[in-house]
Image (cartoon, rainbow, N blue to C red):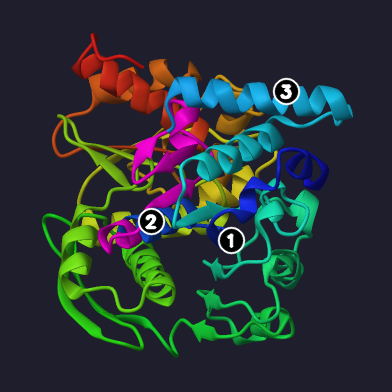
């Protein structure tokens, strides 16, 4: 990546950068930082992963995805450089280089860049050094980073640079040393310098009181549900203040209520209600279980679950806290990484108390069965993988408007 970006003229250094790392919540935090900074008058690029429906979603300027023509032009430049240097780039490296290239063309004030996997060896490390926002540390991609939280923290901490700011969302004091020993400056810590002071669930979402070093924002209504999203929004607000202090309160009250996070605790308005959540690791499953218990405690649920083969399926299913009277439809996404539905169903029969567990070949078939068999107040929850959520989202969109382009 360093060699490629050097050949392309080091486009990643033509704009200021903020890097968003951590285990869960990165995409929501990245998009919210960008929206707040755009509201404050900056021209902001956003790089996220993965996409749900179109590759273009990953790369945006001021909330507008990269046009096909610009993406093709960036790919053409990268192909010339890659062929000349015989680099053997991965798919993610090519897309990351395309983002940096387009951002340089667009004359940004700043880009908010979500890390793909881990720290210094991720393709996005070409954007270092830069201020870092760290969401949290949980177990994920253990085959790469180790099977303990300290090992994951050590890998994630490699994106932190001395004399560059760090907004630290991880609250475990035992892990903090992994980050502070890299001498970030300044350092802001969740629960010390910023945090969610109050949170109250509402019919529309929740009402938040958020604290940062510069202000307290009282009773901010947001449509994103659950404590995890509340923490994500506060972390993003803290990060935005670090870049463009102060963020006018009018911007905060305009931007945060309008924030959505497709595929992350996304409630689809249809009968029956369908909640899409790409929880793909145990921590994400626990957050989803807490949200369901808080916001939809009385509803009987049908879970449509698909899991990638490299994920700890038994732990993930267990952490969803599925109940005896819930129904579980196990399926496989159209991905070579997907765990087979029959295998997942066998795991679910051991890991959950649900009395009704079935395997269904495809996401579409599983979702159609869930919707057809449900009756008010039954609640359909699609989860386990962003691949599964993406397929379900496409199916729901097309069923509502078959003429809608993909």
Q: Residues in magenta?
A: 36-65
Q: Does the magenta stretch include residue 217?
A: no
Percent across and percent down for residue 369 are 33, 19
Q: Which residue lies furthest to the right in this view?
A: 86
Q: Which residue is drawn at 77% across and 28% down?
A: 81
Q: Dot 3: within a 10 Å radius of its alpha carbon, few (fewer than 14), some, or many (20 or more) residues?
A: some
Q: Which of the 4 image quarters holds residue 98?
A: top right
Tell me the quarter of the picture where residue 205 sits. Answer: bottom left
Q: What element carries label 2?
A: helix
| Residue that label 2 marks | 34
Crowding around mark 1 (Cα neighbors within 10 Å: few <14, some 14 to 19, many 20+) is: many
The Cα atoms of the two marked residues, 2 and 3, are separated by 29 Å
- Determine the CA span between mark 2 and mark 1: 15 Å
In the structure shown, which secondary structural element does the residue marked by tag 1 occupy?
A: strand
* Residue at the (71%, 52%) spot, across then down: 126
Q: Circle 3 sits on which residue?
A: 79
């Amino acid at each position: 990546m360093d060699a490629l970006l050097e050949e392309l003229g080091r486009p990643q250094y033509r704009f200021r950068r903020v890097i968003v790392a951590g285990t869960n919540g990165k995409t929501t935090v990245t998009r919210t930082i960008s929206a707040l900074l755009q509201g404050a008058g900056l021209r902001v690029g956003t790089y996220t992963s993965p996409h749900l429906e179109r590759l273009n979603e990953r790369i945006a300027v001021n909330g507008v995805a990269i046009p096909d023509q610009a993406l093709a032009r960036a790919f053409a430049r990268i192909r010339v450089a890659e062929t000349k240097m015989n680099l053997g780039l991965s798919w993610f490296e090519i897309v990351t280089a395309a983002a940096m290239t387009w951002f340089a063309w667009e004359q940004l004030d700043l880009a908010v860049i979500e890390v793909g996997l881990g720290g210094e060896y991720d393709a996005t490390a070409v954007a270092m050094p830069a201020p870092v926002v760290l969401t949290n540390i949980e177990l994920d991609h253990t085959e790469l980073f180790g099977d303990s939280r300290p090992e994951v923290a050590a890998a994630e901490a490699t994106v932190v640079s001395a004399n560059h700011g760090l907004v630290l969302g991880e609250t475990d004091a035992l892990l903090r040393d992994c980050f502070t020993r890299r001498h970030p400056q300044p350092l802001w810590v969740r629960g010390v310098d910023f945090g969610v002071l109050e949170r109250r669930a509402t019919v529309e979402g929740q009402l938040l009181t958020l604290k940062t070093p510069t202000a307290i924002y009282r009773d901010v209504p947001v449509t994103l549900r659950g404590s995890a999203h509340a923490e994500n929004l506060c972390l993003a607000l803290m990060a935005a203040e670090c870049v463009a202090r102060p963020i006018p309160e009018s911007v905060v009250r305009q931007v945060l209520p309008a924030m959505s996070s497709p595929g992350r605790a996304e409630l689809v308005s249809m009968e029956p209600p369908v909640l899409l959540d790409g929880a793909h690791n145990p921590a994400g499953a626990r957050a989803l279980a807490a949200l369901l218990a808080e916001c939809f405690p009385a509803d009987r649920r049908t879970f449509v679950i698909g899991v990638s083969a490299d994920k700890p399926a038994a732990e993930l299913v267990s952490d969803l806290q599925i109940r005896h009277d819930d129904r579980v439809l196990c399926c496989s996404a159209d991905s070579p990484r997907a765990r087979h539905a029959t295998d997942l169903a066998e795991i679910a029969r051991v890991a959950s108390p649900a009395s009704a567990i079935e395997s269904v070949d495809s996401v579409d078939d599983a979702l159609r069965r869930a919707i057809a068999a449900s009756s008010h107040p039954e609640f359909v929850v699609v989860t386990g993988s962003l691949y599964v959520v993406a397929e379900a989202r496409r199916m729901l969109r097309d069923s509502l408007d078959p003429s809608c382009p993909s």
